[in-house]
Amino acid sequence: MKNWWKILGVLLVLYSIIGGFLIPVPAVNRVSESIRNLYFHVPMWFAMIVLATISVIYSVIALSKSSEDADIKSSQSASAAIPFALIGLITGSIWAKFTWGNFWTNDPKLNGVAASLLIYLAYFVLRSSIADEQKKARISSIYNIFAYVMMIVFILIIPRFVDSLHPGNGGNMAFGKYDLDNNMRTVFYPACIGWILMGVWFTEIRVRTEKLKRKYLYGND
Amino acid sequence: MAFILLIFFSATLSAQNSEPVEMADLFYREGKIYLVIAIVSIVFGGMALYLFLMDRKITRIEKKINDKYV
Amino acid sequence: MSFAKISALVKKEFVLEFRQRASFAGIILYLVGCIYLSYLAFIGSELKDRGFWNALLWIILLFNSIISVSKSFASEVKGRALYNYTIYDPRHLILAKLFYNMLLVLVVSLTGFFFYGWFIGNLVKNIPLFVVNICLASMAFSGILTMTTGIASKINGSFTLISVLSIPLLFPLMLIAMRISLLAALGSSFAGCAQYLMALGALNVMVIVLCYLLFPYLWKE
């Protein structure tokens, strides 16, 4: 059946919940059991980046083929990326309060995500200020491409330069090297894939709803 | 979820690696972890079920509109 | 790629600017006004902290850049769009506008730094590095601002829309520029900031390339 990937996504996330609590984790200083948060906090970012990438790919298609369908997919996947970013920030803040001491610190990844969130919100403001659908598609696709490039610069490139509290940047041990031992990998990778699939499911539902709305408003075209 | 776990360990951890890191082993031995797993699974499972029902509703609307407009 | 055509367009920009010298004067007036206001705000307490000094300067430069570029597309009147489209290639137009705006923002920023140092005092130890940083950052500012002003002009955008669209996009740029700026003020050498300067340079190139590729899509009405 054609919705197998949705069920796979749900099963993978369920597996990550059960395995995440049952499978033993390495004992790391300061983080202790809360390292299990890795299974839930980090997949949010992977899902967000994958959805943003899908969004920009459809933006490019929308521009080159003047396709309204591609524009719908582009905007709805960007919409679906926003809650992942918010939940990632909130869960990260709570985790930070317990391990680093503050809800918000001067960490480049936090700044990067917050700024990227603002950039994409500006994208939605732009979309809402244009009435004509075709013009909306063209102009917001252009902005989407800029937004994606800036987001990648901000989230992935700048943290390499700057000192950071996050593991893996600026002098801290990478999660990948020491602590993400093989046990954790067996839960972490399925969790990421599961949440990415869930994100794509959210997007698909939004896309279908938007298409129905347009068909209802503008008739059969 | 991390919040609930962290309530159950209260040691202040120092920066030295020689001290054993306190993990929530007592919690695990008492089997309370299964309660946590059950609750979180039900929460997530409930949301997934809701999502699935919405998906089905949209499929039905799509069929209805396609019949009407096709 | 006709340099003759591009330079003709650039010349047109200059001519238009000199015909209405009032707008350039207005930009300089706004700049000096901001700086003098900041000076008044600091009467009584000496501004000795380089961090504050740096932050204030960049905020002033940011808003003045936005103001300077916001008038850029005002001359592209709606009715003449089709005529213009048949006369010249949008790529030539965007290159001309980019070149002109970069020059404009460069002049405004350097003037701003000059007046800022005059009124509020110069706390910079490594001035050449500081000036190079302002030049690179101004070019990148104007690149992004030119694009967003172009977008806003297509949708009868107000100044608010330009600000909303461009300020989030400028965040990563501001971060790098302010970082180099603070290091320069503290006396770091060119070598110490090498990776940041390269990042800034790369960002410039990326912005120009994106503008060049995407502007034709924006312009076909």
Image (cartoon, coloured by chain):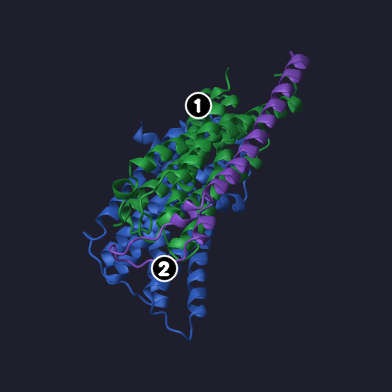
Chain colours: A green, B purple, C blue
Figure quadrant of the C terminus of chain C:
top right
Q: Report which residue position mark 2 lands on.
A: B12
Residue reaching furthest to the right: B68
Q: Residue at x 40, y 46 (%)?
A: A24
Question: Is label 2 or label 1 in front?
Answer: 2
Q: Is residue C86 above or below residue C115?
A: above
Any mark on residue C76, and which? none
Image position of C49 (left or right of A64): left
Q: CA distance from mark 2 to mark 1?
A: 54 Å
Secondary structure state at the residue bearing disc 1:
helix
Which residue is at the far top? Answer: B70
- Element on which disc 2 rests: loop
Q: x%, y% of residue B32?
A: 54, 51
Subunit under mark 1? A
Judged from this view, the residue extending furthest toward the front is: B30
Query: Which residue type does callout 1 highlight?
Result: Ile
